[in-house]
Image (cartoon, rainbow, N blue to C red):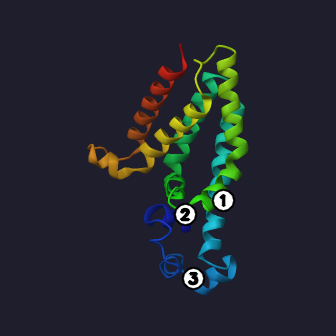
Amino acid sequence: MATVAFADRGVAGTSLDDLARQVGMTKQAILYHFGSKDGLVTAVLEQGAGDLVDVLAAAGETAAAGWDRVEATVRAAFGLAVRRPELVGLLRELGRLGPERTGQVVSQLQPMIDAAVGSLQEGMDDGRLRRSDPRLVLVSAYAIVTGVVADTGVLRAVGLELNLKLAVDLRRAVLAFLRAALLE
């Protein structure tokens, strides 16, 4: 419930009193378990990053390096975004929380980031992927996926509403973009 509230209203816009009412407990019970709102935010971010790592690492392990791994990872990311859009919204919110919070989550995600960069570099080195900076490819793919799925306001501005069909269409568009960028 806290993940959804933080993703929808932001950390600053979510009060512990409102959250306690939504989950049917007291604010004091939340404070007992987490110590403070900051402790709750930390727990939510750690859990969300862990869930993201689990899903994306599993996708990367099942596919061969190169394009197959890129495609499997994008499919897994969109699947997670459709099943748990609050996680993508939480990632979007992370940028607003400052460098300390960003650093905490990035350190948790770093092994996955390093593996993704390594996989892209491997595909580029052996000629399966077009040579470019794998870090820029990764950042671009991340920005596209989180941007198109998490920013429902932008989708509405162009006359779209996020649903399963649109998510599939967006996934196809992202894969076409990446295919054009990475394959000769």
Secondary element at tag 1: helix
Horizontally, is 169 left or right of 61 in the view? Answer: left
- Residue 153 versus residue 37 in the image, above or below: above
Q: In which quarter of the image is residue 71?
A: top right
Can the viewer see residue 64 in this picture? no
Q: Pick whichever, 24 or 92, lies toward us.
A: 92
Q: Quadrant of residue 101?
A: bottom right
- Residue 95 in percent (x, y) is at 52, 55
Residue at point 51% right, 51% down? 88
Residue located farthest toward the front when viewing the structure as drawn = 99
- Residue 156 in percent (x, y) is at 30, 49
- Residue 105 in percent (x, y) is at 65, 55
Q: How many marks?
A: 3
Secondary element at tag 2: helix
Q: Pick whichever, 107 or 89, lies toward us.
A: 107
Residue at point 44% right, 62% down? 8
Secondary element at tag 3: loop
- Tell me the number on the disc at residue 3: 2
Q: What residue type is labelled 3?
A: Met
Q: Pick whichever, 100 or 178, lies toward us.
A: 100
Q: Earlier in the sequence, mark 2 or mark 1?
A: 2
Q: Judge the density around disc 1: few (<14), some (14-19), many (≥20) Cα neighbours within 10 Å.
A: some
- Which residue is labeled 1 in the image? 47
Q: Which of marks 3 and 2 is nearer the N terminus?
A: 2
Whether residues under marks 2 and 1 lie with C-beta atoms below 8 angstroms apart, the answer is yes
Residue at point 55% right, 46% down? 80
The N terminus lies in which quarter of the figure? bottom right
Q: Which amino acid does label 1 sit on?
A: Gln
- Residue 93 in percent (x, y) is at 50, 58
In 3D space, how far apart are the residues under numbered discs 2 and 1 (Cα atoms)?
9 Å
- Which residue is labeled 3 in the image? 25
Q: What residue type is labelled 2?
A: Thr
